[in-house]
């Protein structure tokens, strides 16, 4: 049974429409709306003498908007029955929004806004072993790319459209895994357990290969409940769309690497 025909069973009444379309969208969007408001207030209050960079505010706003567009409105509704729409939603929620939100440096803003005792407490948390695990490139690759393999090569994708809790958990996982994955390769916020550029680049290349191979498998072997035609469109969208976002990630990583190796000017007093 394809997902299209399965969902028609649930779309028979207004109550079922609310349960499967409206409520999940509201639950998923609420944290992003709160995050947008908190970030803007923190940016305004951070330091009157040295305003928070406008470009970071723009990154955050566009990132949050992209995530909300992925999980609410017409795209999210269409994603229930159309795999290409689902894949576009996945790119926005799991790749594009996390990249922009990491570039907005929310942890740096939080440290600037908090009182000194709270900032020290947060710093201790960032130095702890759970933080080390959550920012380890291999762990985040397994969480992000491994999660996608599990979703699209098992019957988890079709089950997601049958159980609302599973649907919510998988979408939360897609965003958090994408955010931690991006964070573990781009050190824009304070990261106290750092890895070398060579190490991060090697892991990044492996993870990109995993993402690309999965998109090709989807192209020829549709996920459970997806027609071959939709799988082909979704697979191409995942392959080329993912490459475009990954290219930005690679450019930023290489620019950081270049700046770290650039000779520093030495001042010689007369």
Image (cartoon, helix red, strand yellow):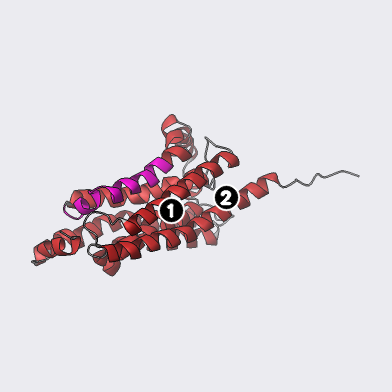
Q: In this view, does 204 lie above or below 192?
A: below
From which residue to which does the magenta span run?
A: 141-162
Q: Nearer the viewer, mark 2 or mark 1?
A: 1
Judge whether residue 250 can be spotted in this image. Answer: yes
Residue displayed at 39% across by 63% down: 236
User: Is residue 6 left or right of 137 when viewed as pictured?
Assistant: left
Pointer 2: residues within 10 angstroms few (<14), some, or many (20+)?
A: some
Residue 62, by quadrant, is: bottom left
Q: Is residue 144 above or below residue 29?
A: above
Magenta region, mostly helix, strand or loop? helix
The label on residue 212 is 1
Residue displayed at 39% across by 41% down: 142
Query: Of 242 and 111, which appears nearest the observer?
Result: 242
Query: Of 247 and 179, which appears nearest the observer?
Result: 247
Q: Is residue 155 above or below residue 117?
A: below
> Going by the picture, which residue comes out furthest to the front?
220
Residue displayed at 50% across by 38% down: 116
Of labels 2 and 1, earlier in sequence is 1
Which residue is the site of mark 2?
253
Q: What element carries label 2?
A: helix
């Amino acid at each position: 049974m394809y997902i299209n025909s399965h969902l028609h069973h649930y779309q028979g009444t207004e109550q079922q429409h609310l349960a499967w379309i409206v409520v999940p969208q509201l639950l998923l969007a609420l944290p992003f709306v709160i995050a947008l408001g908190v970030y803007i207030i923190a940016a305004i209050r951070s330091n009157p003498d040295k305003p928070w960079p406008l470009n970071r505010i723009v990154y955050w706003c566009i990132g949050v908007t992209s995530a909300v567009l992925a999980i609410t409105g017409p795209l999210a509704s269409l994603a229930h029955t159309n795999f290409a729409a689902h894949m576009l939603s996945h790119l926005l929620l799991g790749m594009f929004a996390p990249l922009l939100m990491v570039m907005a440096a929310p942890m740096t803003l939080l440290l600037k806004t908090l009182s000194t005792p709270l900032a020290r407490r947060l710093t201790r948390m960032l130095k702890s072993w759970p933080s080390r695990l959550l920012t380890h490139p291999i762990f985040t690759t397994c969480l992000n790319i491994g999660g996608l393999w599990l979703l699209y090569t098992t019957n988890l994708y079709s089950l997601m459209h049958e159980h609302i809790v599973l649907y919510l958990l998988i979408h939360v996982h897609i965003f958090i895994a994408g955010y931690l994955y991006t964070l573990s390769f781009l050190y824009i916020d304070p990261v106290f357990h750092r890895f070398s550029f060579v190490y991060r680049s090697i892991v990044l290349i492996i993870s990109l290969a995993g993402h690309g191979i999965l998109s090709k498998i989807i192209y020829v072997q549709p996920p459970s409940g997806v027609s071959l035609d939709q799988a082909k469109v979704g697979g191409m969208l995942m392959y080329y769309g993912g490459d475009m976002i990954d290219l930005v990630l690679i450019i930023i990583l290489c620019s950081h690497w270049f700046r770290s190796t650039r000779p520093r000017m030495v001042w010689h007093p007369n």
